[in-house]
């Protein structure tokens, strides 16, 4: 199958008529067609919370040097050769981690390919490497920095690769929510249990992971969210779950928690928009955040897939809205989806509701099945997509020259507290 990047280029240059591929009607944003260097001067002056397209860059963000012209002008073949050559020169001094949602041109150079849980573990697995190049988004690189050794540098090839969902829960708003909750509920119940356990999704800043570490909380990923919620309910009465409302709701619902006991916390409203009684009755308080890619999947798309492909198996990611998860045959993390495809009888048909780079890769790797994305519009995660091979070539060649650029370094206090919550996450194995 033609790569997602090539399809986007063709579609944004001249709609339809893709050679060798099923024509797709459109992309979800014309901005995807702009050159990968175009947003660098405006956005990549900073990184992290705020680095997603259109968000303000915090004043404290380090600056990214301007990527030299030679990388911008190099052909795909030249970049590919240069990345491979730099990696060969660096040998064990570097390890490249690639998230499942990265484009194929980057994934092919990854030493480890995985989800955020697997890559968090991988970050620890090569202590001899001086540099960990993280082809993913900012919160993942922060996590790698926290979990890796002090002698190792973690590099995010393009500092503009943030996560808009992570940006939806900022530290001040969560601190404010916590204060209000403690005022209403107190810190502990009569039996000494915590009234609220904070649970943050991996897709959050290091500051929020540190918040969880300080307040008896934990980090979860989509692969271990159920185990993490069980862990939390062993220790507290209720959970404050941020930033992704959908993962929180879908996971809690599957555990039998009624929707009435899952109020939404909207940081713009006093008590998040609930009454004190509703909060007292709550089991899971859901932050008002979401993933803009997974939010695109709809029940109508599932109905259409079933009408056009009788017998299709529909698997969606738990970041999708609840009606979509309910209408699908099953839901699960990227690793769950990958394993389900691997284990299926040859000749199976899958409609998958998650990021398109992963779906297309699964289709390529499994010609024995028919696999397609539930959303007919090509919509990659726009911030993952910012890791263009040019950026990877650039940071690797800088390493060869003895220079570390685009380093992600979490301050020691934040890292210490965040590591507490991350260690709990690593111990909560996916089911
Ligand atoms: O946890 C991750 O890496 C993400 C973003 C999704 C998943 O299900 O793996």
Image: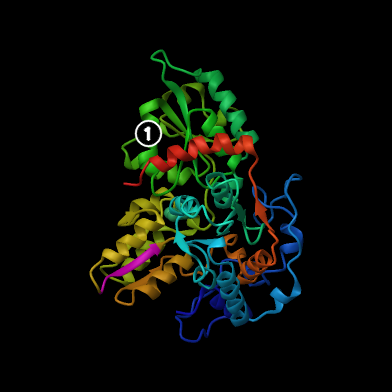
Predominant SS along the magenta part: strand
User: In terms of depth relative to the viewer, which is nearer, 297 or 88?
Assistant: 88
The residue to which callout 1 is attached is: 231
Query: Residue 305 in the image: x percent, y percent?
Result: 35, 67
| Residue drawn where x is 41% and y is 55% of the image | 317
Is the C-beta of the residue carrying label 1 under 8 Å from the nearest atom of ligand 1?
no
How many marks the image carries: the answer is 1
Q: Residue at x 57, y 55 (%)?
A: 137
- x and y, in percent, of residue 265 in the image: 53, 35
Q: Quadrant of residue 370?
A: bottom left
- Above or below, 290 against 267 in this view is below
- Residue 142 percent across, percent down from the top left: 58, 48
Of residues 21 and 229, the one nearer the viewer is 229
**In magenta segment, residue 227:** no
**Does the image show residue 234?**
yes
- Image: magenta residue range: 347-352
At mark 1, the secondary structure is helix
Observer-nearest residue: 258 or 215? 215
């Amino acid at each position: 199958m033609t790569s997602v990047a090539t399809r986007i280029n063709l579609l944004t240059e001249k709609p339809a008529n893709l050679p060798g591929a099923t024509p797709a009607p459109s992309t979800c944003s014309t901005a995807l067609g702009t050159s990968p260097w175009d947003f660098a001067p405006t956005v990549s002056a900073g990184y992290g919370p705020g680095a997603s397209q259109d968000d303000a860059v915090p004043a404290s963000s380090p600056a990214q040097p301007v990527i030299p012209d030679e990388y911008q002008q190099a052909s795909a073949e030249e970049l590919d050769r240069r990345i491979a050559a730099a990696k060969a020169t660096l040998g064990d001094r570097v390890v490249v981690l690639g998230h499942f949602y990265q484009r194929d041109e980057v994934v092919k150079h990854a030493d480890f390919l995985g989800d955020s849980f697997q890559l968090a573990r991988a970050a620890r697995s090569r202590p001899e490497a001086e540099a960990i190049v993280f082809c993913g988004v900012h919160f993942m690189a922060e996590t790698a920095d926290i979990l890796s050794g002090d002698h190792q540098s973690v590099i995010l090839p393009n500092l503009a690769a943030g996560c808009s969902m992570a940006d939806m829960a900022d530290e001040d708003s969560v601190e404010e929510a916590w204060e209000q909750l403690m005022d209403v509920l107190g810190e502990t119940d009569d039996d000494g249990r915590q009234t609220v356990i904070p649970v943050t999704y991996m897709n959050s800043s290091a500051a929020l992971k540190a918040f969880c570490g300080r307040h008896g909380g934990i980090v979860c990923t989509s692969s271990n969210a159920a185990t993490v919620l069980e862990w939390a309910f062993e220790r507290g009465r209720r959970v404050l779950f941020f930033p992704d409302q959908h993962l929180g709701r879908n996971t809690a619902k599957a555990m039998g928690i009624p929707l009435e006991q899952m109020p939404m916390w909207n940081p713009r409203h006093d008590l998040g928009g609930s009454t004190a009684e509703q909060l007292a009755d709550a089991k899971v308080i859901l932050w008002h955040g979401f993933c803009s890619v997974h939010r695109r999947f709809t029940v109508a798309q599932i109905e259409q897939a079933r009408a056009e492909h009788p017998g299709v198996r529909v698997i969606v990611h738990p970041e999708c809205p609840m009606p979509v998860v309910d209408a699908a045959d099953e839901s699960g993390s990227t690793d769950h989806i990958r394993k389900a495809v691997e284990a299926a009888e040859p000749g199976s048909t899958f409609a998958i509701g998650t990021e398109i780079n992963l779906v297309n890769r699964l289709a390529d790797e499994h010609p024995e099945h028919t696999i397609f994305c539930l959303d007919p519009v090509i919509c990659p995660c726009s911030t993952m997509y910012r890791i263009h091979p040019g950026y990877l070539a650039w940071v690797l060649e800088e390493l060869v020259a003895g220079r570390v650029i685009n380093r992600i370094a979490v301050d020691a206090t934040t890292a210490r507290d965040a590591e507490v919550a991350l260690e709990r996450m690593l111990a909560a194995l996916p089911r």
